Amino acid sequence: MLTSNILTLLLTTASASSIPSSTIDRSLIPEFGLRAGQSPNGSGSCATANNILIPCFCPPDRGEFVDRVNSAVAAGNVLGTPVTFNVDPLAQSDKDRFDRATTCLIVLQNFNGTRGVGCPAVSVPNILSQQKQFARLL
Ligand SMILES: *[C@@H]1O[C@H](CO)[C@@H](O)[C@H](O)[C@H]1NC(C)=O
Ligand SMILES: *[C@@H]1O[C@H](CO)[C@@H](O)[C@H](O)[C@H]1NC(C)=O
């Protein structure tokens, strides 16, 4: 069991290093600021810190989310909605940060692959507050 976990880990690491260099620096993708599954109500709804009901799978798995952001940035859109994300870690203007947070929210809100089906913005309080903060400064 342990051996197979280590093998899986090694394989995962090996394939991760073959991902094209366009892969986004993870530090440019803000933390969610909430862990999924808080205060489940027994029928699929959970709650934010402010007691707003959200689906219990939200926010989604971080690794899966990062993959989706990568795909969205590579494609330049999410289901037809254009996204802008400066992948240069040195680009830290208010506009760059606003655009990155906005891209994350668009990916999140369409997470299930159908327009508008995914997680609400309130399920990622950090990203949402970053978007608001930098919008004010633009
Ligand atoms: C849980 O919340 C959902 C969404 O508001 C609601 O539809 C459902 O009835 C609630 N279930 C319980 C057991 O309160
Ligand atoms: C969206 O995907 C999540 C898992 O990735 C799943 O738990 C959820 O039921 C899906 N929601 C809808 C509405 O398809």
Image: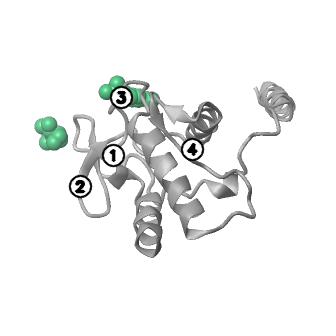
Q: Quadrant of residue 66?
A: top right
Q: Quadrant of residue 28?
A: bottom right
Q: Element type at marker 1?
A: loop
Residues under numbered marks 4 and 1 in contact, where contact means CB atoms less than 8 Å apart:
no
Badge 4 local density, few (<14 within 10 Å), some, or many (20+)? few
The residue identified by callout 1 is: 120
**Total marks placed:** 4
Name the residue rendered at 55%, 40% in the picture: 65
The residue identified by callout 3 is: 115
- Cα separation between marks 3 and 1: 12 Å
Identify the mark nearer the N-term, 4 or 3. Answer: 4
Residues under numbered marks 1 and 2 in contact, where contact means CB atoms less than 8 Å apart:
yes
3 vs 1, front mark? 3
- Cα separation between marks 4 and 1: 15 Å
- Cα separation between marks 4 and 3: 20 Å
4 vs 1, front mark? 1
Is 99 left or right of 2, judged from the image as shown? Answer: left
Name the residue rendered at 43%, 67% in the picture: 135
Name the residue rendered at 60%, 53% in the picture: 29
- Cα separation between marks 2 and 4: 21 Å
Badge 2 local density, few (<14 within 10 Å), some, or many (20+)? few
- Cα separation between marks 3 and 2: 22 Å
Identify the mark nearer the N-term, 4 or 1. Answer: 4
Q: Quadrant of the N terminus?
A: top right
4 vs 3, front mark? 3
Front-most of residues 52 and 76: 76
Identify the mark nearer the N-term, 3 or 2. Answer: 2
**CB of mark 4 near ligand 2 (< 8 Å):** no
User: Which label belongs to residue 52?
Assistant: 2
